[in-house]
């Protein structure tokens, strides 16, 4: 493909606007051809200064706009299933931000629709697979130098949660990244979930169970624990330590810029995911554009998105009802073997 890949971006909120900027300024080989958002004024603001973009209130109108070759879905999770199925019906390659679909039944319908096509069309936006530190950890674990993985210790902290955040969303929105990262790093499925609840921080809104301590069991006998703390007040911090039979390795502590003044020395702390994972998002979208232009689909797919939704659902049941909850996964289709 010699011409630029024309991308329809669905959703012009925080994430969608950042992807519009990325496609226009940071990634070669692609251009923003259309944008859809029910708030067309917000969409117009997001594409200000970008040439040749049509703005639509409806997702399907953007998919049918002239020059659209592929779709980037950055709309709220409940809108994903309809958008994915519409893209599949048009044969359009997709990069879909997580979650693939919030509920596992809907995610499984997307899996079944792609299986009926007989080929992969969609990649799911689990950007930690494109973070340089996480990639190094994956390579180290795959090499076998540290022996069999026994445990993953994960930390996921935000400065503050959005106003709409619920206790369940700590698991099915925030921890979904650790769910995918653990499956990818270990090459194992997550088979059961337990959620422990310390006393809520005074920084959390009334009724929000924050922080939480989530423990996953895996098909290979490893344990994965996640500290999720979305109202820490002090920064966006993500780290992962793998403990294996012959050693351990930790990522996420990479030093940032150090500033020295007369008042002393300080280090910058990332305030949100778009800062901490800016390079990972660039690399993810660049890889998707390159693969799409070459007629391929790489990276995490709809099966990974379905598995994450199924594990997260089990985690929410564990949070709400207590105790250990087993993960119920459908059989994996041959397309994703």
Image (tube, rainbow, N blue to C red):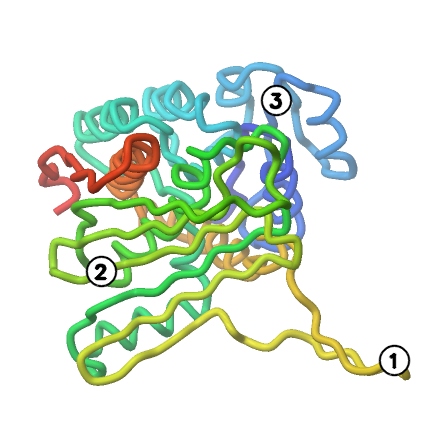
Q: Under tag 3, what secondary structure? A: loop
Count neighbours of disc 1 (C-alpha within 10 A) and say few if under 14, some if 14 to 19, many if 20 or more.
Answer: few
Residue 15 numbered tag: none
Q: Which residue is mark 2?
A: 223
Q: Which residue is mark 3?
A: 37
The mark that comes first in sequence, 3 or 1, is: 3
Q: Which residue is mark 1?
A: 263
**Cα–Cα gap, marks 3 and 1:** 46 Å
Which of pointers 3 and 1 indicates the residue nearer the eye?
A: 1
The residue depicted at 9 percent of the width and 36 percent of the height is: 331
Position of residue 323 in the picture relative to residue 4 (left or right): left
The residue depicted at 66 percent of the width and 45 percent of the height is: 21
> What x and y, as percent, mark residue 87?
39, 25
The mark that comes first in sequence, 3 or 2, is: 3
Count neighbours of disc 2 (C-alpha within 10 A) and say few if under 14, some if 14 to 19, many if 20 or more.
Answer: some
The residue depicted at 62 percent of the width and 17 percent of the height is: 38
35, 239: nearer the viewer: 239
Image-quadrant location for residue 304: top left
**Cα–Cα gap, marks 3 and 2:** 41 Å
Q: Indicate whether 207 appears above or below 149.
A: above
């Amino acid at each position: 493909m010699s011409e630029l890949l024309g991308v329809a971006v669905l959703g012009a909120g925080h994430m969608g606007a950042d992807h519009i900027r990325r496609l226009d300024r940071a990634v070669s080989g692609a251009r923003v051809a259309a944008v859809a958002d029910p708030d067309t004024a917000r969409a117009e603001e997001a594409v200000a200064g970008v040439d040749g973009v049509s703005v639509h209130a409806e997702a399907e109108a953007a998919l049918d706009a002239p020059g659209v070759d592929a779709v980037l879905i950055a709309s709220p999770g409940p809108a994903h299933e309809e958008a994915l199925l519409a893209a599949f019906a048009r044969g359009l390659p997709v990069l879909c931000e997580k979650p693939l679909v919030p509920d596992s039944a809907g995610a499984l319908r997307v899996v079944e629709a792609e299986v009926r096509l007989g080929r992969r069309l969609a990649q799911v936006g689990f950007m930690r697979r494109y973070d340089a530190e996480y990639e190094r950890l994956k390579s180290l674990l795959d090499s076998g130098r540290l022996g069999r993985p026994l445990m993953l210790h994960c930390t996921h902290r935000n400065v503050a949660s959005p106003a709409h955040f619920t206790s369940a969303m700590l698991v099915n929105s925030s921890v979904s990244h650790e769910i995918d990262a653990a499956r990818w790093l270990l090459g194992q499925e997550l088979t059961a979930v337990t959620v422990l609840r310390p006393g809520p921080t005074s920084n959390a809104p009334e009724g929000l169970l924050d922080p939480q301590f989530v423990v996953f069991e895996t098909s290979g006998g490893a344990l994965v624990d996640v500290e999720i703390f979305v109202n820490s007040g002090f920064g966006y911090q993500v780290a992962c330590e793998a403990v294996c039979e012959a050693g351990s390795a930790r990522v996420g502590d990479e030093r940032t810029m150090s500033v020295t003044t007369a008042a002393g020395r300080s280090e910058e702390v990332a305030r949100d995911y778009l800062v901490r994972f800016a390079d990972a998002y660039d690399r993810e979208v660049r890889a998707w554009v390159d693969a799409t232009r070459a007629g391929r689909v790489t990276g995490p797919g709809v099966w990974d998105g379905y598995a994450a939704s199924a594990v997260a659902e089990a985690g929410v049941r564990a949070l709400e009802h207590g105790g250990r909850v087993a993960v119920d996964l459908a059989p994996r289709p041959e397309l994703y073997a």
